[in-house]
Image (tube, rainbow, N blue to C red):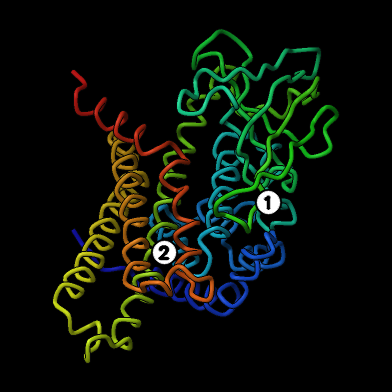
Amino acid sequence: MDFDLTDEQLAFQETARDFARSEWLPHAPGWDAREEFPVDALRAAAALGFAGIYVKDEFGGSGLTRLDAALIFEELATACASTAAYLSIHNMAAWMIDRFGTAAQRARFLPKLMSMEHFASYCLTEPGSGSDAAALATTARRDGDDYVLNGAKAFISGGGSSDIYVAMVRTGESGPKGISCLVVERGAKGLSFGKKEEKLGWHSQPTRAVIFEDCRVPVANRLGREGEGFSIAMMGLDGGRLNIGACSLGGARAAYEAARGYMLERRQFGQRLADFQALQFKLADMASELDAARLLLWRAATSLDRGDHQATLHCAMAKRIATDAGFHVVNEALQLHGGYGYLKDFPIERYLRDLRVHQILEGTNEIMRVIIARHLLRQ
């Protein structure tokens, strides 16, 4: 068991850190205030290989590991957790095409996704099926060489802005075995979008409903066989949970570092905040929680990389712990800043708003507990 990163991992971790500080951090407050989708900044990240971190290199992916991705997303999220989270979803959707697509599909879709000339979204959640994902109701009826889709997806990151929508649809019986996975392209007849949602956080990425009204999608755009969509979606989410956990760690680390600096400077009752033992204990707990969550996340990433039979369990544990710890640490950092933490002049409130949703998406943390319990009680 080796807890040291390799020289290569340290190098791209530093590259991601330097890029985040110089290219994203100065602009992140403006993206948040203007609710701006930073297309050029995302494409700059893609130029470093961050659009397909664990996509094979045949069509421009970086061919790295899930652990490598966790290192990169943590660094990017220290600057802007919202933008890093969208990039993580793009990576997940691109990996699904790389992993389950045919050679022709991979050649067609991946090159533009790797440069982020095209953006990708993941479409599973529906207005009537959130945690109960296998109950999705969007239908895909076979009509010659096309499927005809009817239904809607909810809370889609990149909705209306993305070019590719990796969508789970019902082609057969009720339940998970009747679900298939289709790549829906922007401009498809019958594809439309809802209003841009007004959100607490994640302002740098648009969120809309994706609506299918007799939307025609070629059968050639199906990933895998009919009925395999649910398992494809769940495999994608294993990695997505690691990515969003890493984004929570990055945002929380930035808030922790800001709180530490504030404690060393701020004086009350004739001494620095850093000299009060109660506040020292608070900071110690914040650092310990982050480190524990990071180690659990790295274990889960390594488990997924090597195909461990308990990888799904490990990913659920890591996502639950990392996102809960991440939000708690940011909330504590805001408390340490007092009233200043509540002001937009300071970055803490932005991290708090952006990290809150991580406890909900990619499977709520309550569903993570369901997954964990099922594994523990399996006979």
Label 1: few (<14), some (14–19) or many (≥20) C-alpha neighbours in 10 Å: many
The alpha-carbon separation of the residues under discs 1 and 2 comes to 24 Å
- Left or right of 214, for residue 321: left
Task: Determine the image quadrant of residue 217.
Answer: top right
As drawn, 133 above or below 278? above
Q: Residue at 67%, 16% (x, y): give it.
A: 139
Residue 250 is tagged as 2
Q: Estimate the x, y position of residue 74 in percent, counting from the top left.
A: 43, 63
- Left or right of 371, for residue 176: right
As drawn, 110 above or below 126? below
> Which is more toward the observer, 271 or 316?
271
Q: Residue at 74%, 20% (x, y): give it.
A: 149
Q: Estimate the x, y position of residue 242 in percent, counting from the top left.
A: 40, 49
Select label 1 or label 2 by which is in front.
Answer: 2
> Which is more toward the observer, 145 or 348?
348
Q: Residue at 67%, 59% (x, y): give it.
A: 35
Assign a secondary structure to mark 1. helix
Amino acid marked by disc 2? Gly
Residue farthest toward the left in the current orientation of the protein:
277
Amino acid marked by disc 1? Leu
Q: Pointer 1: what residue?
A: 113
> Which is more toward the observer, 53 or 266?
266
Assign a secondary structure to mark 2. helix
As drawn, 98 above or below 9? above
- Left or right of 175, for residue 114: right
